[in-house]
Amino acid sequence: MNIKKQIVAACAVVTVASASAFDAALTDPLAWLYADSKIATAERLDEVDVPANGVVDANILVNGLKPGERLEFDASEKGGEWYRMRAVPVARNTGVNGFLEKNPGDNPHVARRAPFEVFDVLEPMADECGAARSASAPYHAVITDAKETEGLYFRIQNPPKGAKSFDIRFRIKQENEERLLSLKVNVHNVLLPSVGKDSFKYTNWMDFDSMAVSHGLKPWSEEHWRMIEKYVRLATRGRQNMGLMRAVFEKDANGAMRIDKKKFARFLDIYNRTGIWYLEGTHLAGFVNGWGSPAFKTAYTTNVTTTVEGALALSKLAKMYMEEIETRGLRDRWYQHVADEPGGANVPEYRITAGIVRRYMPGIRTVDAVEEPSFAGALDVWCPKVNSFERHHALYDSFRTNFGDRVWCYTCCVPGGKWMNRTMDGELLRPALIPWVSVMWDVDGFLHWGYNRWQRNQGQDPFKEPYPKSWGGSNNGNSLPSGDTHIVYPGKDGPWPSARLEATRAGMEDADLLTMLRRRDKERADGFVRRIARGFQDYTPSCKLYREVRRDILRALESKIVK
């Protein structure tokens, strides 16, 4: 890799050395930065270890800037991306059991007590020099309206296998004053699998209608499809390799359901081109009278699935999906959802409903957010919340042994407390460690319902309201925790990532590295995990320890390579 020895002054910017009135420091991207963060107490970063095909990233915290003045920054490495970190206000904390606290102070396990403003939004910064920039010059970006404290995020992907360690040098400049920073990057001789068939299973459910509404586009227009692809590309950049086949059913002129084959093909084309390998058939049934009711109705109807009419409608939907699966050769890629989050009162109805789906989609794996052990034998892939999985760990192991079942896990508005989740008031390291514990316990997939599901019907602006105003159901109107509805933001011309998306991506990289090591030495790999996490609520929230263990995992993988 051709590393520049000196920082090039991009766009003919003249650098004048002087004592700096502001301060800047590299900080760990797995530790939150806040609108009032101070360098003296921030988690510093000076060295990272990465596999080939991995991501090198870092935050830069800048204090003491002149508000409203121009701020310039660049890096010595070509191909890097700059983001301005934007703060989101969090007025209420997550409850000890989930949702939001009903009484402030109930949850002692938050990373910070509300209210606070956290840098979760990553706004892409354009190269100010654009096409006129020399091919050898560093990426040069500018903030024209700097605040006293700014957070910057830098990201570069795909250091090639065999590359040696190198330094990335950063320059931060306001007026005639500047700061120079340096990050040492150790590239290990380990190739991270590309996102797709062989990477850790990971899905966030997308709201395609929201993509149109949030960006002022006509639903299913060419502009909408291009926007969908932008959202999917950002998801796969975050190592998501599963995608829902939603919005593909429609009614014909006679009111009968059919699959829109053109729309199905368009989704499949986008998924194939962006790296999505596994496909999820959307739920074919839902609760009759709201969440938790005992009966299910077939999707797009009011017919109970256990009636003749409901069973007939359900069988037709299943057969339509199956026809597309067989015609397009998707059998090995498909997972089918039956009904979301059934509980103990739904066991008989779910067994019948799932049985109909499995009869007309033979050999297709069914998966649902099911955690009651009494559903044994009714599905192929269990997907309990992380706390439920830990509670019934031995039972899930027996299902895997006796039935050949598989297990994923998920988080949502629950759990709260110290449990790993990806809310804005828990340590940012939590979503990064979920894949670590999952691999150690043979959980081979992670699901979250909220990719871009800010609640439009409540006027939720994700930049200003990290949760909707209220949320009904069994929680008596208390709302979802901060960030539960989304992990991306509706930017000016497409989706913007979040700090939580990148933290989860880091953990998904590690899941693939740990899986590689476990194939060679399971005990050693699990020992690395236990150094930082013994379970989904027993972990050490230390970025320094995380960096040490990750380095040791990469070294262990290198040592096993046959020369």
Image (spheres, rainbow, N blue to C red):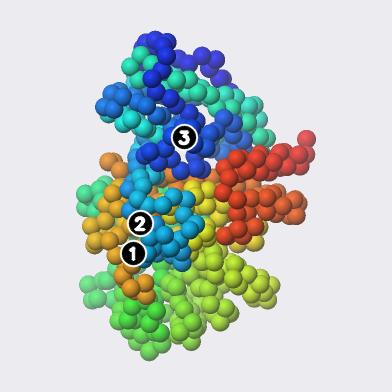
User: Looking at the image, which residue is at 75% across and 55% down?
Assistant: 523
Image x and y of residue 205, in percent = 41, 59
Q: Residue at x 69, y 41 (%)?
A: 552
What amino acid is found at the position of numbered circle 3 in the picture?
Asn
Is residue 491 shown left or right of residue 191? left
The amino acid on which the numbered mark 2 sits, given as a three-letter code, is: Arg
Which of the two discs, 1 and 2, labels the residue nearer the N terminus?
2
Give whichever of discs 3 and 1 has the lower sequence position.
3
Label 2 neighbourhood size at 10 Å, few (<14), some (14-19), many (20+)?
many
Residue 59 has which mark?
Answer: 3
* Residue position for label 2: 92
Tag 2 secondary structure: loop
Q: Of label 3 and label 2, which has the lower sequence position? A: 3
Residue drawn where x is 48% and y is 58% of the image: 108
Mark 1 lies on residue: 479
Check whether the beta carbons of the residues at disc 3 and disc 2 lie within 8 A of each other. no
